[in-house]
Amino acid sequence: MKITGYRSLTAFHDWRRPVGDVNGIVESGITEVPVLLVETDGGLTGIGLGAHREIDRIFPAVDGADPRAVSTLYDSMLSHVFKSGHAGATYGTIAAIDMALWDLKAKMADEPLWRTLGAGDGFVPGYASGLCYGLEDEAFAEHYTEWAERGFTAAKIKGGRDLDRDIARLETVRGILSRNTTRPALMLDVNEAWNTKQAIRHLAEIEKHIDLTWIEEPVRRWDAPGHAQISRAARTAVATGENLTGLEQYAPLFDAGAVDIVQTGSVWGITHFLRVAMAAHARGLPVSPVAYNANPVAHAAAAVPNMIGIEVQDFAFPTGFAVDQQIADGGIVLGDRPGLGIEIDEAAVARSAAATGWGERGGPHRRPAGAGLRLVPETRRASE
């Protein structure tokens, strides 16, 4: 079987609530989901999820190849672009192709990808998330109550600007998840909003109230000395890595002892996750992938020995997606449908509404001008 071509779709995910982090909120709760369909001469189609704007440039590296040679083709794509670098949109495109190739490889074997990758079963432990920064207090509590009802014992909230609010919300989630465990795992993600000394001061205050499991991206993603200093000063673990593309970008963090929980972005693909997981495993570190629509990297997470938990952000899937998995028992239960377990109704995707807010100015990918520069945390007025 040979790779013969590709098609692109844009699906949409209705979260049914505002989503975002300290950098910005999508009030509509509707976000776009780019879909890459890799076609073969054998009638099978591989599905890759994530932005792939560089597809025309990178596809020649895999065109006409046997899709089962996933690892070789991954390195072929990296070699194809080595002169111009592989970060950003280029790496995202490589990831989408890589995901589609793994989907094809498992479909050709007529088995779910988690089995192709050597996992013993399809259960992946997870932690509740939800891009919850924009939720008001009542909606915030209702949201995490839904996670508790599905058996979750761990949760991560979004914060980073209002220290009192962050502490209060961590306490709220602790109370909600206590129905499932006496000691819930509680994480705080500030999305690079602090500088090193702010992080140390804020964590000292938080740790007076909360047994924090980890602090995520406390400072800029490339700041190995800063992460190392924070890790030494705080009791909590430091988690980072979701925005890094390629093993070489992790090397400074590893060398500095700057990361305790090694993360990968699901949008960077399955081979990326597997390689980072093994690099972390060699150093005695756990790995945790962040979430993405339909949780495709969960298949790989089920197969590595040092997986501490996958982020799970929603109970539903994009319009037109039929995904063979359940969110239950405190994690993801992957099914037995071949490949990634994703089927797409292209007609339904075509009818779905357009997204609003994700790419707009001030959206959740735009770093505020004051990030890392606030002398004191923002606080709510007493009248609020």
Image: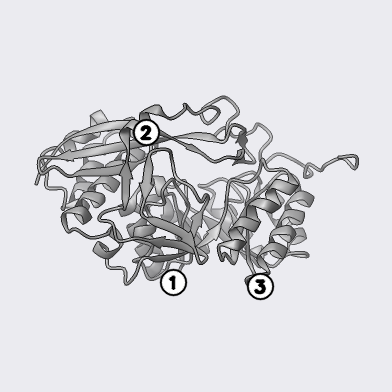
Mark 1 secondary-structure assignment: loop
Q: Which mark is residue 284?
A: 1
Mark-to-mark CA distance, 1 and 2: 45 Å
Residue under label 2: 348
Q: Position of residue 192 (x, y in %)?
A: 60, 45
Under circle 2, the secondary element is: helix
Q: Is residue 251 left or right of residue 65?
A: right
Residue drawn at (52%, 47%) of the image: 221
The quadrant of the picture occupied by the C terminus is top right
> Residue 180 location, x and y as percent?
63, 71
Comparing 15 with 210, the one in front is 15
Q: Residues within 10 Å of mark 1 (few under 14, many from 20)?
A: few
Nearest to N terminus: mark 1 or mark 2: 1
Mark carried by residue 183 = 3
Query: Type of residue at label 2?
Result: Ala
**Is residue 188 in sight in this rendering?**
no
Q: Amino acid at mark 1?
A: Gly
- Indicate the quadrant where residue 78 lies: top left
